[in-house]
Amino acid sequence: MSERVAVYPGTFDPVTFGHMDIIWRATRIVDRLVVAVAVNPGKDPLFTVDERVALMEEEIKAHDGDFADRVQVLPFDSLLMDFVTDMGAAIIIRGLRAVSDFEYEFQMAAMNGRLNSSVETVFLTASETHQFIASRFVKEIGRLGGDVGHFVSARVKARLVEQLRSGGNG
């Protein structure tokens, strides 16, 4: 049987407990997971792609469990389907927090299916404790001086506070 390889793409600006929940759950259904950190300058990320990759790698290494050896974190700045093919993957993992996410994700899955029909998109719904977490809300709470410790690890919280104090963007 061939190895089941999946790609979990996102901006991860910053990585949240919700992202980590999807990563952990995805590793239960695939043999190898590539967390693809999108460069995505259109979203005006707070952290550079290198910083986001480093934060994600730290979070994965620190996570309880034995899945870290099956997760690889890589940046990408290309068409997702080209990246998926380059990684030898046949699955794209997407997290859904709410019904409002579904319409966009459904359209994206359909477009990706037209580009490469041999790649399947698998939707994992956010667990009930993480359904409301969105990176954009975490950044906004942090910008306004709120405590983001309920949504991100202490490592990410410290980096977020530091980044916001320094004015952001790397």
Image (cartoon, helix red, strand yellow):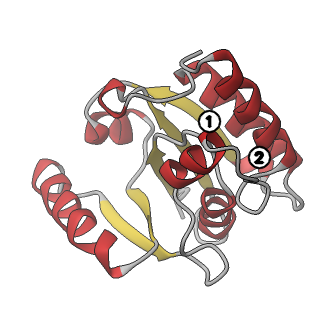
Q: Is residue 40 left or right of residue 23?
A: left
Residue in front for this viewpoint, 94 or 85 = 94
Q: What is the quadrant of the C terminus in the image? A: top right
Q: What is the quadrant of the N terminus in the image? A: bottom right
Residue in front for this viewpoint, 137 or 115 = 137
Q: Find residue 61 and report its horizontal and vertical position in percent.
A: 84, 43
Q: Find residue 97 and report its horizontal and vertical position in percent.
A: 46, 73
Q: Find residue 143 and report its horizontal and vertical position in percent.
A: 60, 39
Mark drawn on residue 97: none
Q: Is residue 75 left or right of residue 143?
A: left
Q: Secondary structure at mark 2?
A: helix
Quickly name the residue at label 2: 60
Q: Residue at x 60, y 19 (%)?
A: 50
Quickly name the residue at label 1: 73
Q: Residue at x 69, y 64 (%)?
A: 24
Residue in front for this viewpoint, 18 or 87 = 18
Q: Is residue 165 left or right of residue 6?
A: right
The quarter of the displayed image where residue 53 is located: top right
Q: Secondary structure at mark 1?
A: strand
**Furthest residue in direction left, as rendered:** 114
Question: Disc 1, disc 2: CB below 8 Å?
Answer: yes
Amino acid type, residue under disc 1 in the picture = Val
**Furthest residue in direction bottom, as rendered:** 128
Is residue 59 depicted above or below 91 in this figure? above
Mark 2 closeness class: few <14, some 14–19, many ≥20 residues within 10 Å: many
Q: How many marks on residues?
A: 2
The quarter of the displayed image where residue 104 is located: bottom left
Is residue 96 depicted above or below 72 in this figure? below
